[in-house]
């Protein structure tokens, strides 16, 4: 389908569920794609120990990731560029140009951007004070065997806490969950779990930057200051969009609404909005983005 001046019919930036779904859908309608991913395909899926909201019978992230990766590697019309990071995205009247970290430029009539989100760090949260540019691991990276019998301080009340507990129902890990008032609605599913101690705070100061054990001074929402001690500290304060540099329109929250983009740039997956960060919506939006490019290339009118 691609004209000679282009390297491919569709460039896909990001190899998570949305990007992989875009590549499969594109192949199904005869479009050639180049998928650029700096890590492994479905990297974050491999770190999700339990699933309860996807079709296909998969109950954990690694199984679903293996199935997606196997299908994509068998997709002849998809060329994988793994270990490559996009340094610039440019969209013009007739093409999209994507530059990768080797300096190479790739061109296509359209691009799907599905780079998703990455975990927020302490310096991103106004209710946390931490040393310097401290970077902490998210809770979903904690290994159950290593955490067994230990006390983990979890900063924030985001959804991965419930996922961790469901995935390891017999774990002896104790979670001290320090969260601001804005996260109060998020902790309902873990409130009655005996392994969880909830610590509502107005502000938390992390005293130990590295190593174990760790300690923090917490100003409670009740106005009482207390010291929290734990074996290690992990994050569950949410995510931030990880869009590549270049011609993408970002909203005030950093996300990239699909309707605000250049007509040749299609945004899919978690990068669209914080409200739709689910595997199922990522798969659907990736497939839809590929079809949009397919119809647009043929001047087929749509109703959107």
Image (spheres, grey):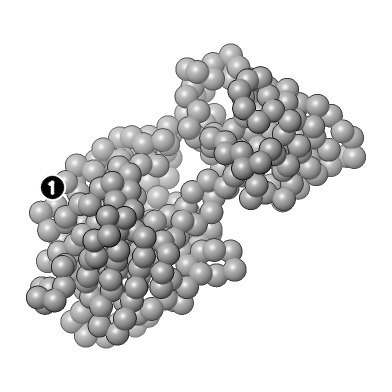
Q: Secondary structure at mark 1?
A: loop
Total labels: the figure holds 1
- Give the residue drawn at x 34%, y 58%: 86
Q: Is residue 43 left or right of residue 10?
A: right
Q: Nearer the viewer, residue 277 or 190?
A: 277
Q: Which image quadrant: the C terminus?
A: bottom left
* Residue 82 position in % (x across, y down): 25, 48
**Mark 1, residue position:** 74
* Residue 185 position in % (x across, y down): 68, 47
- Give the residue drawn at x 44%, y 60%: 243
**Residue 241 visible (yes or no):** yes
* Residue 39 position in % (x across, y down): 33, 44
| In the depicted structure, whether residue 22 falls above or below residue 187 | below
| In the depicted structure, whether residue 6 falls above or below residue 274 | below
Q: Answer with the quarter of the image where residue 77 lies.
A: bottom left
* Residue 59 position in % (x across, y down): 37, 35
How many residues crowd mark 1 within 10 Å: few (<14), some (14–19), many (20+)?
few
Residue found at the very far right of the displayed protein: 223
Q: Nearer the viewer, residue 119 or 61?
A: 119
């Amino acid at each position: 389908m691609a004209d000679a001046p282009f390297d491919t019919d569709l460039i896909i930036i990001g190899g998570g569920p949305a990007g992989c779904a875009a590549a499969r859908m594109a192949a199904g309608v005869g479009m050639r794609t180049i998928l650029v991913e700096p890590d492994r395909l479905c990297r974050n899926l491999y770190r999700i120990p339990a699933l309860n909201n996807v079709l296909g019978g998969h109950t954990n992230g690694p199984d679903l990731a293996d199935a997606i990766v196997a299908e994509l590697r068998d997709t002849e019309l998809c060329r994988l560029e793994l270990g490559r990071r996009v340094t610039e995205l440019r969209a013009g009247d007739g093409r999209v140009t994507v530059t990768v970290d080797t300096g190479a430029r790739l061109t296509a009539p359209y691009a799907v951007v599905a780079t998703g989100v990455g975990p927020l760090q302490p310096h991103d949260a106004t209710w946390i004070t931490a040393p310097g540019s401290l970077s902490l691991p998210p809770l979903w990276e904690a290994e159950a065997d290593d955490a067994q019998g230990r006390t983990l301080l979890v900063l924030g009340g985001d959804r991965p806490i419930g996922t961790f507990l469901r995935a390891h129902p017999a774990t002896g890990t104790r979670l001290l969950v320090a969260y601001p008032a804005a996260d109060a609605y998020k902790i309902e599913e873990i409130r009655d779990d005996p392994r969880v101690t909830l610590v509502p705070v107005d502000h938390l100061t992390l005293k130990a930057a590295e190593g174990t054990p760790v300690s923090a001074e917490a100003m409670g929402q009740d106005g009482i200051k207390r010291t929290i001690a734990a074996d290690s500290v992990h994050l569950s304060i949410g995510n931030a969009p990880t869009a590549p540099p270049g011609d993408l329109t970002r909203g005030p929250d950093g996300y990239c609404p699909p309707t605000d983009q250049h007509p040749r740039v299609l945004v899919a997956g978690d990068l669209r909005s914080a409200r739709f960060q689910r595997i199922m919506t990522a798969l659907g939006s990736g497939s839809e983005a590929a079809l949009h490019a397919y119809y647009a290339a043929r001047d087929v009118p749509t109703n959107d």
